[in-house]
């Protein structure tokens, strides 16, 4: 009996082989432009960042270059793999807010993109899936970010401003990644919010962080759950 239990625990240990570091969302950090990339560019480099975009454990590069042809888009982000292969070219428009994080949220190893971008009258919060074969990115869903600030003893829920959130709250349940969320809440949004036509609602997605605006609470949220990305999508479809 004892041996069976130990065997079972060992098997579970193998299945749920997700490092704690994999459950942390990461944002690109500033680097010097690698010479191998800089030498191949004719446009002015506005900035260079590094992050593992494909989930192979090696740091890749996002190089922002000026658009010489027009002001809209004013620039392009060129994504290069760790071996300096161009993965994709993303047009950049002038926005008030443009936050980007990477974290794996499903069974394929490449990280998904958590984005918060837009203007002071409305920020869109989105999760994107990456197709690294053709360099495309597809929107999985838009959401309402909810911040849980551990320093708050009342355990109020705050609005998850992109400058306040530090990590999405996810867990590995026997190797299956689940997101802390609610599909039943009374969060009202005003401003210019772009909700995809197929979504009947914006799910609440929970984040850790430190609230800089604790007077902005989101109120009661019912039925907090741990769901996979697929289950969230199934639950918010019209
Ligand atoms: Ca990489
Ligand atoms: Ca993934």
Image (tube, helix red, strand yellow):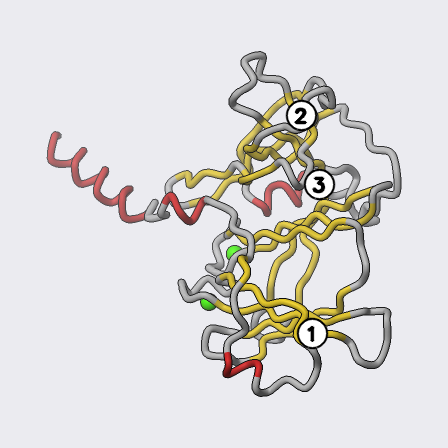
Residue in the picture at 68% in, 61% down: 138
Residue at position x 37%, y 41% from top? 174
Position of 9 relative to 58 (above/below): above
Frontmost residue, 160 versus 16? 160
User: Of callouts 2 and 1, which one flags the residue occurring earlier in the amino acid sequence?
Assistant: 1
The Cα atoms of the two marked residues, 2 and 3, are separated by 14 Å
- Of badges 1 and 3, the one in the foreground is 1
* Quarter of the figure with residue 205: top right
Quadrant of res 232: top right
- In depth, the one of 51 and 15 nearer the eye is 51
Task: Give how far across and how far down residue 11 sits, in percent.
Answer: 24, 45
Q: Mark 3 points at which residue?
A: 143
> Mark 2 against mark 1, which lies toward the viewer?
1
Figure quadrant of the C terminus: top right
Spatial CA span between label 2 and label 1: 36 Å
Task: Residue 48: give x, y in percent of width and height.
Answer: 59, 67
Q: In this view, does 130 lie above or below 135?
A: above
Relative to 74, is 106 on the left or the right? Answer: left
Q: Is mark 1 on a helix, strand or loop?
A: strand
The residue singled out by tag 2 in the image is 158
Residue 174 to residue 183: above or below: below
Q: Are marks 1 and 3 in contact (CB under 8 Å)?
A: no
Q: Is mark 1 within 8 Å of ligand 1?
A: no
Residue at x 51% of width, y 74% of height: 81
Task: Tell me which numbered mark, 1 or 3, is placed earlier along the sequence.
Answer: 1
Q: Residues within 10 Å of mark 1 (few under 14, many from 20)?
A: many
| Residue at the image position 66 percent from the left and 20 percent from the top | 222
Q: In this view, does 71 lie to the left or right of 15?
A: right
Q: Which mark is residue 65?
A: 1
Q: Where is residue 172 in the image (x, y as percent from the top left)?
A: 42, 41
Quick one: SS at disc 2? strand
Q: Between residue 3 and residue 85, name the one nearer to us.
A: 85
């Amino acid at each position: 009996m004892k041996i069976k239990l130990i065997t079972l625990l060992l098997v579970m240990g193998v299945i749920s082989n997700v490092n704690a570091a994999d459950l942390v969302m990461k944002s690109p950090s500033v680097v010097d432009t690698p010479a191998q990339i800089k030498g191949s560019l004719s446009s002015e480099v506005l900035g260079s960042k590094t992050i593992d975009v494909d989930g192979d454990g090696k740091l890749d590069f996002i190089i922002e270059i000026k658009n010489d042809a027009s002001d809209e888009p004013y620039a392009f982000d060129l994504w290069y793999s760790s071996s300096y292969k161009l993965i994709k070219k993303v047009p950049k428009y002038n926005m008030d807010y443009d936050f980007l994080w990477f974290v794996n949220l499903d069974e394929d190893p490449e990280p998904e993109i958590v984005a918060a971008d837009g203007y002071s009258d409305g920020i869109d919060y989105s999760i994107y899936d990456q197709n690294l074969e053709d360099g495309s990115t597809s929107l999985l869903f838009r959401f309402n970010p909810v911040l849980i600030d551990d320093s708050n003893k009342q355990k109020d829920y705050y609005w998850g401003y992109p400058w306040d959130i530090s990590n999405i709250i996810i867990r590995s349940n026997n190797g299956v990644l689940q997101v802390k969320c609610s599909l039943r809440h009374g969060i009202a949004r005003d401003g210019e919010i772009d909700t995809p036509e197929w979504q009947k609602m914006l799910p609440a997605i929970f984040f850790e962080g430190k609230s800089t605006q604790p007077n902005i609470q989101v109120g009661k949220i019912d039925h907090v759950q741990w769901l996979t990305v697929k289950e969230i999508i199934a639950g918010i479809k019209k």
